[in-house]
Amino acid sequence: MDSERLQSMSTDQLWDLYEKIHSALADKLQAEKVKLEERLRKIEGRRIEGSGIEGRVRRPYPPVHPKYKNPKNPTEIWSGRGKQPLWVREQLKSGKKLDQFLIAERRRGSRRRSGAAR
């Protein structure tokens, strides 16, 4: 619509036009939202419901055993994964090596293999 035609319309006509446009736009936005949610479900492989996302079940991972132990406080252990604990960072800053904190089984270098020899 050109601006001349809009200016020639009465307030009631303009309001009716506004309501029709608003309704049509809301319908199109809702349809687009449904399409996008469907695409998201396909990409993530998950179902989106109401308030939260219910996803597929993660596969079970084996437990991660500790690899390092704080010599000052043996109850503080670290698996070697993720962010370094404060005690590890402090010890490394003081000049010690990470190998010095290996738990005894690991330090010997005797890794147990299951199954037949290769």
Image (cartoon, grey):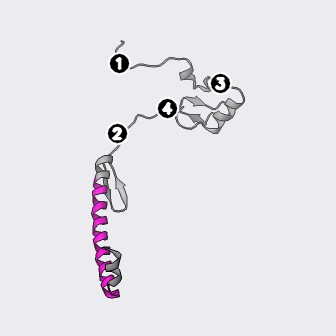
Q: Are marks 4 and 2 in contact (CB under 8 Å)?
A: no
Residue 20 in magenta?
Answer: yes
Q: Residue at x 52, y 34 (%)?
A: 81
Q: Residue at x 34, y 79 (%)?
A: 4
Q: Mark 3 — residue?
A: 97
Q: Nearer the viewer, mark 4 or mark 2?
A: 2
- The first of marks 1 and 4 along the sequence is 4
Q: Mark 1 — residue?
A: 115
Whether residue 93 is visible to the viewer of this picture, yes or no, is yes
- The first of marks 1 and 3 along the sequence is 3
Q: Is residue 99 left or right of residue 30?
A: right
Q: Residue at x 30, y 82 (%)?
A: 16
Element type where label 4 sits in the image: loop
Q: Mark 4 — residue?
A: 65
- Tell me if mark 4 has few (under 14), some (14-19) or many (20+) residues whose alpha carbon lies within 10 angstroms of its own: few
Magenta range = 9-38
Type of the residue with mark 4: His
Type of the residue with mark 2: Arg
- The first of marks 3 and 2 along the sequence is 2
Extreme residue in the front direction: 4
Q: Quadrant of the C terminus?
A: top left
Q: Residue at x 39, y 36 (%)?
A: 61
Question: How far apart are labels 1 and 4 at the CA level?
Answer: 20 Å
Question: How far apart are labels 2 and 1 at the CA level?
Answer: 23 Å
Magenta region, mostly helix, strand or loop?
A: helix
Q: Are marks 1 and 4 in contact (CB under 8 Å)?
A: no
Q: Position of residue 104 (x, y in %)?
A: 57, 23
Q: Are marks 2 and 1 in contact (CB under 8 Å)?
A: no
- Tell me if mark 3 has few (under 14), some (14-19) or many (20+) residues whose alpha carbon lies within 10 angstroms of its own: few
Q: Mark 2 — residue?
A: 59
Q: Quadrant for residue 106, please give it.
A: top right
- The first of marks 2 and 1 along the sequence is 2
